[in-house]
Structures are given as structure tokens and as C-alpha cells.
Image (tube, rainbow, N blue to C red):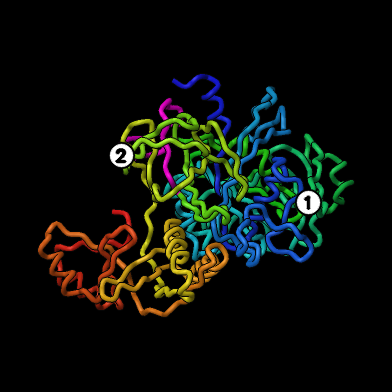
Amino acid sequence: MLTNQEQQEILRRRTFAIISHPDAGKTTLTEKLLLYGGAIHVAGAVKSNKIRKTATSDWMEIEKQRGISVATSVMGFDYRPTFHNEKRESGAENTKADDTVYHINILDTPGHQDFAEDTFRTLTAVDSAIVVIDAAKGVETQTRRLMEVCRMRKTPVMVFINKMDREGKDPFDLLDEVERELGIHVRPLSWPINQGQRFKGVYNIYQSTLDLYQPDKTHVTESIRFDDVTDPQIAALVGDKDAEKLQEDLEMIEGVYNPFSEADYLAGELAPVFFGSALNTFGVKELLECFVHIAPSPRPVQAEEREVSPMEDKFTGFCFKIHANMDPNHRSCIAFFKICSGKFVRNTYYKHVRKDQQMRFAAPTCFMAQRKETVDEAYAGDIIGLPDTGNFKIGDTLTSGENLHFKGLPSFSPEMFKYIENADPMKQKQLDKGVAQLMDEGVAQLFTSQLNGRKIIGTVGQLQFEVIQYRLEHEYQAKCRWQPLQMYKACWIESDDAAELDTFKKRKAQYMATDKDGRDVFMADSAYVLQMAQNDYKHITFHFTSEF
């Protein structure tokens, strides 16, 4: 049994992902949450000529140059709320000060659709999510796709409508759009006073406080508490017209939207909404204070064999991400593990279920983006990094002895294919190692043609090829060049009829390849070729994911 102290350690954890369409402000919001948590003292910019410091979570050189996230970053910090004796939205008075120091694990995900698979897998490792929406652009394509995954997993979601200091859509229109496009009920817990150049601040409905807007990219603004929205001092601060409009808007909110229900939020049916400007450090604290109070502590995780409770005394965890070359000086690979239950202890033997081997780890780490610290113990809900010398694949499970297999999202069939060739014959070893490690990350896939032995890289977008080429050159000192390849679809094949499978592989030899795990892959160069193969060989199953 876990001790009472160990149970409290699990209950104080909050592990969540920040997701959105590119450029909505995910990484900037991450920076400001780290600023409030004291994890950093000066927040960086994703891309700015005026701020020399780049975002903490965008630590890869290509991320700094492009101003985008191309890999999920993990950051952890402790946070003690300043909001005590609060009056909850439900109307119940909480007279006990919340002195809990919450341990927050943030996963800043890529927004670009070419790296959506990394984000999909990350969503299997979190207990909740914050969706960032641009006030001017509203709900965009990638946000809709990511929200589908959250709905499928019943992940609790909070919404942060960003960039209120710029001209954008009407707040009520934005709320309607979120409900319509994301398929979830909303309840505003803060409300903006104007927007753009007329933006004066945000009234925090959850805490009954007013925050006056002061543009400041690196520091925190103070809140003023009001027990009544009709307080004359509000009019003195924002003007009679805006104070009157605020009162009317709040009355409409109370009339149109149901009261906030924590149970509906935890069930993934209701999204609380906050407004602010992440770049100017505004509205972020209100989001964080509400988040630590209502967001779920580690939740049960469904394995193929059974449901695993975080409060079980036996350790379990699964690998949801592998990152190659986190330290270029040592060519190190790190396997990111989500702890599902119990407590992880350094230098303790755990069972690698796929390999059926006992393994122990002398240097498990926790993260602040690229910076790592060795940890002696970690609890359910935490994300830890384990040094990987080729032992792990995405989806692997570690346990205290039980054979468990956690359900995850598979790797999908690539949509673009290119031959990869060595541009520097003196660096073949470096190229081979770089390609092998980058493919283990699961963002792109490697195939070897059985016809000519050439290596083929498959991705879901052109940007991935650019990132691979850049990382090979700058992290492994290996140069590559791409040759176009006309390919429609790669699909994994299997059959209970060994004779038919053997015949198929011989007749379709020019289309056959193997993936990095040696599995047979049929690479059709057109939809017609694939359709004919499926019609002619009824006993062969064609899989469009690499897990089956």
C-alpha cells in the first residue's frame, strides 16, 4: 500500500498539454506559466527582434530560427496558489485556505500539422489540456483535429482565448464558435473589457477580481478584488461606459450559460473559458489559479488487460515519446515515460514487458525543456526521462512485474515519400546513426526497398523533411540529399495464409519494402494499384497504421 504521504504526492500533481493551431500562442502561454511558477525569471519570446531570449520550451536550434515548435517539450515546476478562501462559481464558500503546493507538468506540443502525430501521442500521456485560440482567427483546422482526440479520450479541456490586446471577434461570437466547432459546452470564467487598443482588462468571474491591463512581456500584474460587480470603484477604474457594458455582459452570461460545474468539466463535457494576452502576461495567472483547483489529479489509465489506478502501490508506466540527441555532445536519446501508477524509484529493477527483461536506471531525469535533473523518485502523473540506447520503442511498458500493455495511438501511414542519400561519403556512419535515432522518435518512418535496397523516408508533410535534413547536419554532422519518389500509400501487410502472402511478396516485389522493425510493407504508387492488390488477395490484411 502507498503511504498517506505518497498518496498526497500523487494528488497534488497536474499533468496537462497545451494544444492549438500554429501561431495561436501555445509556446508563449507556456513561458508565462513558467514565469508565474518561478521556474524562469524572464520570459522569452517565440520569435521577436526585441526580445533576445527565446522561449524555454523551444530549445532546438531550428525551433529558435523558425519560431515554431517541432517537438513536444516537457517542463515541470511547483506552484502554490495565492487565491485563498475563494468563493467558488457554484456559490459554496471555501473557508479553508488552500496551502497545497501543486506539482505541474506542462507538455508544450507542436501546432504544425506536419507534427500532429507527436501531439496525438502526447495527449495519451496527459490528464487534461488547455486549448489556446487566437481571438482574431477563432477556431482553426488543427485545433479541431486535436479536440477530436480530446473528445475521444474524454480529456478535460480549458480554453484560453489569446491576443485580446489585438482587434478580434466579439467574445460572445467566439464562445458560440467554440461550442459549434469543437463540440463542447462552454462557461466563461473571466470576461474582457473591450479589446484591441481599447482593451482595459479582464474581470475574473471565478475569483470576483478585476485585472487592469498593463502591457508587460516579462512581469506580472496585480488583481483588485470586488465582491460586487456594481462597485462604483470599477467605473472609476475603467470608465462608466465600460463598467456598464461589463455589468450587462455578466448578466447575459448568467442568463445564457449554465453555472460552472466541476463534474461536467472533469467528464470532458464543459470547457471553462478565460480571456487574456499571453505575450503581455495578462490573464494567465487567472487561468493558472483556476486550473490548479479544478484540473484533475492523475486519472486511471486503460491498459489492454485492465484499468490501472494511479493509487496502486505497484509502479507502471509507458513510453509515449523518444527524443534523439537531446545533448549533442553525447548523442544521447531519452525515452519519455508517463508514470501511470505507484512510485518510481531510481536504481530499482523494473520489468521491460516487450523484452521480458529486468532493467534498472541510474540516471532518470525530470525536465525543464532541454535542461535535465536526476531524480531519485517520481510519482503517478509525472513525466520522467530514461536514457535509451535502443531498448525502447514508443508504446513500451515498464512495470513492477505485471504484464501490461497500455493502449495508445498508432503511427499512421505517411503521405509523402523521398529517397534519402548520403551527400558526404566520409560521414556514412554519422548519417546511419542520425537516421536511426531520428526515426525512433516516431515523427517520420524509414523503409528499405526490397527491389534496390534504397532507404525511403516517409512523412506527413514537407516540413518534416526540412527538419530531418537540418538536424542531421547540425546535430550529427551528416549531410543528406532527397530524391523525389512518386508513392501513394504505404501499408503493412499480414495474413494467416502463408502461401498466399509469399506469392504476393514475390509478384509485387517491386512494391515491397521493410520498415525499421523488419515488418513487410506494401508501397503502392497509385490508388489503382492498391485497390487491385486488395481485390486480388482476399486473405491478406492491409493495415494503414503500424500497430496492429
Magenta segment: 300-320
Residue 2 is labelled as none
Q: Quadrant of residue 303?
A: top left
Residue lying at 40% horizontally and 69% vertically, measured from the top left: 457
Looking at this view, name the residue that lies furthest to the left.
499
Residue lying at 28% horizontally and 60% vertically, measured from the top left: 518
Callout 1 amino acid: Thr
Residue lying at 26% horizontally and 69% vertically, measured from the top left: 522
In the structure shown, which secondary structural element does the residue marked by tag 1 occupy?
A: loop
Q: Is 39 displayed left or right of 392 in the figure?
A: right
Does the rendering let one see residue 179? Answer: no
Q: Which of labels 1 and 2 is toward the front?
A: 2
Residue placed under numbered mark 1 in the picture: 218
Q: Quadrant of residue 23?
A: bottom right
Residue 60 position within the rendered picture, expressed as x and y whole percent measured from the top left: 60, 59
In the structure shown, which secondary structural element does the residue marked by tag 2 occupy?
A: loop
Callout 2 amino acid: Asp
Return the residue nearer the eye: 368 or 211. Answer: 368
Q: Would you say the residues marked 1 and 2 are in contact, meaning their CB atoms lie under 8 Å apart?
A: no
Above or below, comparing residue 522 to residue 263 in the picture: below
Residue placed under numbered mark 2 in the picture: 356
Residue 27 position within the rendered picture, expressed as x and y whole percent measured from the top left: 64, 55
Above or below, comparing residue 336 to residue 297 in the picture: below
Does the rendering let one see residue 275? Answer: yes
Quadrant location, the N terminus: top left
